[in-house]
Image (cartoon, grey):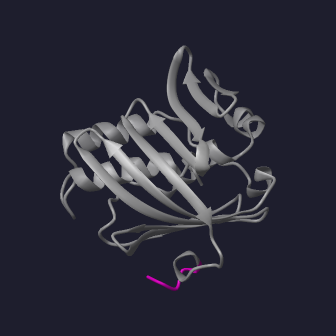
C-alpha cells in the first residue's frame, strides 16, 4: 500500500492540473504519459505472502503542487481492496482478486488516474522483490539494498522506494516527476469506504 503511492501522486497532480470535466493541461498530459512508460504490475494477491490492513496518509509533492490524500487498504491471499479519500470524500475504490480489477470512482475524480496504476504502485512497494522481478518486462530491473528499492530501465533509475523510521515510506517517481510520502497506521476495522457502502 505504501506504494499506492505512485499513482496517487499522479492522481493529485492531475487533479490540480485538469479542471472537472475539462481537458488536461500539457503538464497533466506529460505526467500521464510518463506514468504509462512504467510497467504495470498484476501480481496475484497470494504472492504478497501476508495480510495488510492499513490506513495511510499520503502527502503528494509535484512541481507547483502539493496535496494530502487518505487511503484505506486491505489485502490478503484472495484480494486487495482499497479506498482513496480526498478532502474527506471517497474519490475511488478498487478491488483486485488476481483476475479482475473492479474500480469505481467519484464523478469529480480525474479520469486520467486509473485504479490499475494505483494497484501497480502498491505492488511495487509491498510485494516481495522476487515476485516483482519475475513480472518485469525485458530491460527492467528491481534492486533492493537495505531499506531502498529501485526500479530501473537499463541504466536509468525510474522509481525509488525508501522506507524510513516510524513506518514512513517515500516514493520518488523521476519521470513524472513527483514524490509521495506515506505514513501508515493499523486499520482497526473495515471501514464503509473500503467495503463500498460509503460513497
Asked whether the viewer can see residue 41, the reply is: no
- The residue that appears at 51% across and 41% down in the rendered structure is 170
Seen from the viewer's position, the closer of residues 52 and 37 is 52
Quick one: which residue is furthest to the front in this view? 166
Quick one: which residue is furthest to the bottom in this view? 197
If the image is split into quadrants, where does the N terminus sit? bottom right
- The residue that appears at 41% across and 61% down in the rendered structure is 69
- The residue that appears at 46% across and 36% down in the rendered structure is 172
Residue 196 spot, x, y in % from top left: 54, 80
- The residue that appears at 81% across and 53% down in the rendered structure is 49
If the image is split into quadrants, where does the C terminus sit? bottom left
Residue 40 among magenta residues: no
- Residue 175 in which image quadrant: top left
Residue 169 spot, x, y in % from top left: 55, 45
- Residue 72 in which image quadrant: bottom right
Residue 157 spot, x, y in % from top left: 51, 22
Q: Give the range drawn in magenta.
A: 195-199
Residue 114 spot, x, y in % from top left: 45, 55
- Residue 106 in which image quadrant: bottom left
Predominant secondary structure in magenta? loop
24 displayed left or right of 112 = left
Amino acid at each position: 500500500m505504501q506504494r499506492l503511492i505512485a499513482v496517487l501522486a499522479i492522481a493529485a497532480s492531475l487533479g490540480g492540473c485538469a479542471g472537472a470535466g475539462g481537458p488536461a493541461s500539457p503538464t497533466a498530459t506529460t505526467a500521464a504519459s510518463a506514468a504509462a512508460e512504467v510497467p504495470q504490475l498484476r501480481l496475484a494477491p497470494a504472492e504478497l505472502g501476508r495480510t495488510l490492513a492499513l490506513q495511510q496518509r499520503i502527502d503528494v509533492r509535484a512541481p507547483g503542487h502539493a496535496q494530502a490524500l487518505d487511503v484505506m487498504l486491505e489485502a490478503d491471499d484472495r484480494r486487495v481492496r482499497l479506498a482513496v479519500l480526498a478532502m474527506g470524500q471517497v474519490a475511488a475504490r478498487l478491488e483486485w482478486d488476481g483476475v479482475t480489477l473492479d474500480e469505481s470512482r467519484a464523478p469529480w475524480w480525474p479520469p486520467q488516474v486509473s485504479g490499475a496504476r494505483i494497484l501497480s504502485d502498491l505492488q511495487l512497494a509491498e510485494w516481495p522483490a522476487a515476485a516483482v522481478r519475475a513480472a518485469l518486462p525485458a530491460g527492467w530491473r528491481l534492486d533492493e539494498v537495505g531499506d531502498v528499492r529501485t526500479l530501473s530501465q537499463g541504466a536509468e533509475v525510474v522509481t525509488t522506494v525508501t522506507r524510513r523510521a516510524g513506518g514512513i515510506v517515500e516514493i520518488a517517481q523521476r519521470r513524472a516527476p513527483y514524490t509521495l510520502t506515506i505514513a501508515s497506521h493499523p486499520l482497526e476495522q473495515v471501514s464503509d469506504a473500503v467495503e463500498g457502502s460509503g460513497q
